[in-house]
């Protein structure tokens, strides 16, 4: 990545944070706070806990869209086999293990649960668990805000091109994505104006207040959308 381009995009990012466009993304910070307030992997009723963790007063677009319902499917799984769902999340969140392996195993586990659900519900037309890299990165981001951010491969790919990277990813590489996200976070973290502008748009009762790589997700979007 080109250092001069990173700094130029940080300047552009500051203008974004001052704009009305930045206000429209605050629902993500509300969802992060809600998750942090409710998530408890040891909760007796994991389905109820999971449902309470993924909520938002404005929109459900992070976990529900056209032909995309990962939350609904995970609730079906949690009610069908709560102990196995608990195991799946514990494995995903075990930081000592390789991140790419954890993500791939989680997808595999979801496939197994979908198969079991279809066996138990012979008339069901469900054929997709919808647990892709994005929703899994959301779980990781919301559990460990200082370590992860939302994964969007096309945006990541375009951002690397705009930042002058000589090695543009040609296929999903979630491990590299998180490493680069942490590198960019160091640049944002050092810029006091970035943090101050971000803090000004937050409401203490509604939004997550602490440092989070979720800000890098917004930075990636600005880079991808506005080539310098």
Image: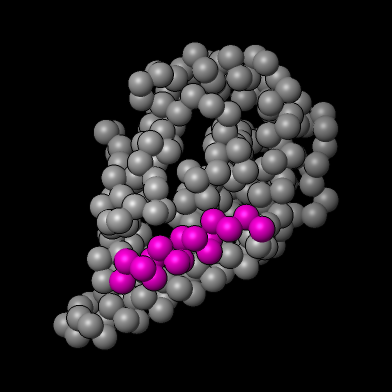
**Which stretch appears magenta?**
81-96
Q: Quadrant of the C terminus?
A: top right
Q: Residue at x 77, y 31 (%)?
A: 5
| Colour scheme employed for the rendering of this structure | one colour
Give the answer, above or below, for where 225 lies relative to 109: above
Q: Is residue 86 magenta?
A: yes
User: Is 101 placed left or right of 1 in the picture?
Assistant: left
Give the answer, above or below, for where 132 lies relative to 209: below
Q: Residue at x 61, y 19 (%)?
A: 195
x and y, in percent, of residue 129 in the image: 36, 69
Give the answer, above or below, for where 150 lies relative to 77: above
x and y, in percent, of residue 216 in the image: 61, 36
Q: Residue at x 62, y 68 (%)?
A: 101
x and y, in percent, of residue 175 in the image: 68, 57
Q: Quadrant of the N terminus?
A: top right
Q: Quadrant of residue 77?
A: bottom left
- Secondary structure mostly seen in magenta is helix
Q: Residue at x 39, y 70 (%)?
A: 84
Q: Is residue 47 visible?
A: yes
User: Is 159 placed left or right of 59 in the picture?
Assistant: right
Q: Is residue 122 magenta?
A: no
Q: Nearer the viewer, residue 52 or 151?
A: 52
Give the answer, above or below, for where 153 lies relative to 127: above
Extreme-left residue of the structure: 123
Q: Nearer the viewer, residue 83 or 99?
A: 83
Q: Quadrant of residue 145?
A: top right
Q: Quadrant of residue 67?
A: bottom left
Q: How many marks?
A: 0
x and y, in percent, of residue 164 in the image: 79, 42
């Amino acid at each position: 990545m080109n250092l001069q381009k990173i700094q130029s995009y940080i300047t552009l990012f500051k203008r974004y944070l001052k704009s009305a466009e930045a206000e429209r993304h605050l629902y993500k910070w509300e969802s992060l706070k809600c998750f942090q307030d409710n998530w408890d992997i040891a909760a007796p009723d994991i389905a109820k806990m999971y449902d309470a963790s993924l909520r938002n007063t404005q929109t459900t677009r992070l976990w529900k869209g056209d032909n995309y319902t990962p939350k609904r499917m995970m609730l079906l799984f949690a009610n069908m086999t709560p102990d196995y769902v608990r195991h799946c999340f514990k494995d995903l969140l075990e930081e000592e293990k390789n991140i790419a392996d954890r993500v791939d195993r989680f997808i595999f586990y979801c496939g197994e649960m979908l198969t079991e659900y279809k066996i138990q519900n012979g008339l069901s037309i469900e054929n997709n668990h919808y647990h892709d890299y994005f929703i899994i990165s959301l779980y990781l981001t919301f559990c460990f805000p200082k370590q992860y951010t939302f994964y969007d491969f096309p945006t990541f790919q375009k951002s690397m091109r705009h930042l002058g990277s000589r090695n543009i990813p040609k296929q999903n590489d979630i491990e590299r994505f998180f490493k680069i996200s942490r590198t960019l976070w160091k640049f944002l973290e050092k810029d006091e104006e970035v943090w101050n502008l971000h803090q000004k748009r937050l409401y203490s009762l509604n939004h997550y207040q602490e440092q989070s790589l979720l800000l890098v997700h917004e930075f990636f979007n600005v880079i991808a959308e506005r080539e310098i």
